[in-house]
Image (cartoon, rainbow, N blue to C red):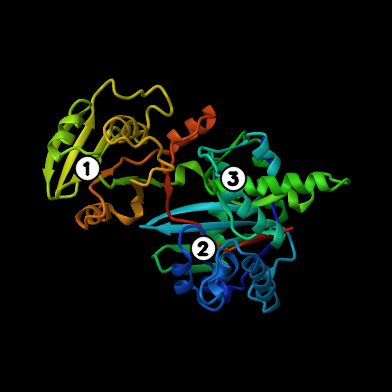
Amino acid sequence: MVKIKPFKATRPPKQYAAEVASRPYDVLNSQEAKAEATERSLLHIIKPEIDFDPIAGEHEQRVYDKAVENFKLWKNKEWLVKDGEEHYYIYAQTMNGKTQYGLAVASHFQDYIDGKIKKHELTRVEKEEDRMIHVNIQNANIEPVFFAYPAIKEVDDIVANIVKNQPAEYDFTSEDGVRHQMWVINEKATNDRITKIFEGVPAMYVADGHHRTAAAARVGQERMKANPNHTGEEEYNYFLAVIFPDNQLNIIDYNRVVKDLNGLTKEQFLDALKKDFDVVEVGKEIYKPNKLHNFGMYLDGKWYNLTAKAGTYDDNDPIGVLDVTVLSNLVLDNILGIKDLRTDKRIDFVGGIRGLGELQRRVDSGEMKVAFALYPVSMKQLIDIADSGKIMPPKTTWFEPKLRSGVVIHEF
């Protein structure tokens, strides 16, 4: 059963929350971060290369040193202040009229090692190493990871009661139109009850932040080995997570664009598709897939409705049922010769938050030859895969909205 605890968050005073809180380090490049960062923005701490002119390399020692310097400066200026007591924190996000309510918690690294925190993606060692450096030099989890857990009515009721009867500590809308609210859970009895409830939860699921989770677990292991008096309760055993009920989360589509048709003419490519798909030309109007095994395709100024034929997928296999698997096997590999989605330079991936018009734009510009729109993965599919111990193909899930970094920080 999973182990969580309340913690003393380091966080901005109310008047600075909207400015300090930033987008995560991995959703914008250094140039975008430099343009976006205001004076108090957390981007100076999580992407400190922006403080150099010209912008420095992310992995330079002076950049890591700058991260430490800026974190100390933000605390000295009281743009970040540590709470005196341990709490859980409610973090709500509202996008397009829909609100999801998470709990900011300290999660134990051993649960990841033991497989109680379940992943659905592979991680890359070099990205883990970079995140480990940041955690170690700061003695803190500056940015949260994003977990899902099987929805629990008692937790929903606790959250609803606090949200109804207690004013939010933070309430601001970020530039992308997402509303962010945070409440501090003050009553010790309520915090203790939440801890107790989660002792009965068999597993949590990594939604977003696989590299940060893996890095945090490795930091915990290293510090455990280095401490002869290790008890398992030291703060370094825990890392920052915001956990959401699975029934509140929204996975959106993650689409593909390809540079060429692997030497085929348009007619040859369409003929090849007809072996495994029912192909219907739609015309100029964008076609959005409406169910599993249905795809949109944009080619040469026209949209097509593709439906995979029965027998080309395996709905009884947690990986075989995924449309990313169907597309990868039947089209990207068999027809277009793209064998490795991680390394092939002929393919790119477009998050559904950008809209299907972005697929059309990239083809019309001549940069890409063909685009594929996919039906989004469901939370049930993600959980089934994580429970089976299997791994999703790359670039399968896109969660939106993203957590803001800097709403709460966990120091140890």
* Label disc, if present, on residue 181 of the rendered structure: 2
Disc 2 residue type (three-letter)? Gln
Whichever of callouts 2 and 1 sits on the residue coming sooner in the sequence is: 2
Furthest residue toward right: 229
Circle 3: element type: helix
- Please provide percent x and percent y for residue 278: 17, 30
Circle 2: element type: strand
Q: Name the residue tied to disc 1.
A: 297
* Nearest to viewer (mark 3 / mark 1): 3
Front one among 135 and 21: 135
Front one among 61 and 407: 61
Whichever of callouts 2 and 3 sits on the residue coming sooner in the sequence is: 3
Q: Name the residue tied to disc 3.
A: 125
- Please provide percent x and percent y for residue 260: 25, 44
Q: Is residue 5 above or below residue 66?
A: above
Q: Is residue 346 left or right of residue 171?
A: left
Q: Is residue 396 left or right of residue 131?
A: left
Q: Is residue 408 above or below residue 54?
A: above
For the point 13% across and 36% down, the residue is 280
Disc 3 residue type (three-letter)? Val
Whichever of callouts 3 and 1 sits on the residue coming sooner in the sequence is: 3
**Mark 2: few/some/many CA within 10 Å (<14, 14-19, 20+):** many
For the point 62% across and 73% down, the residue is 13
Q: Is residue 365 above or below residue 107?
A: below
* Nearest to viewer (mark 2 / mark 1): 1
- Please provide percent x and percent y for residue 378: 40, 38
Q: Are marks 2 and 1 in contact (CB under 8 Å)?
A: no
Circle 1: element type: strand
Q: Is residue 13 left or right of residue 188?
A: left
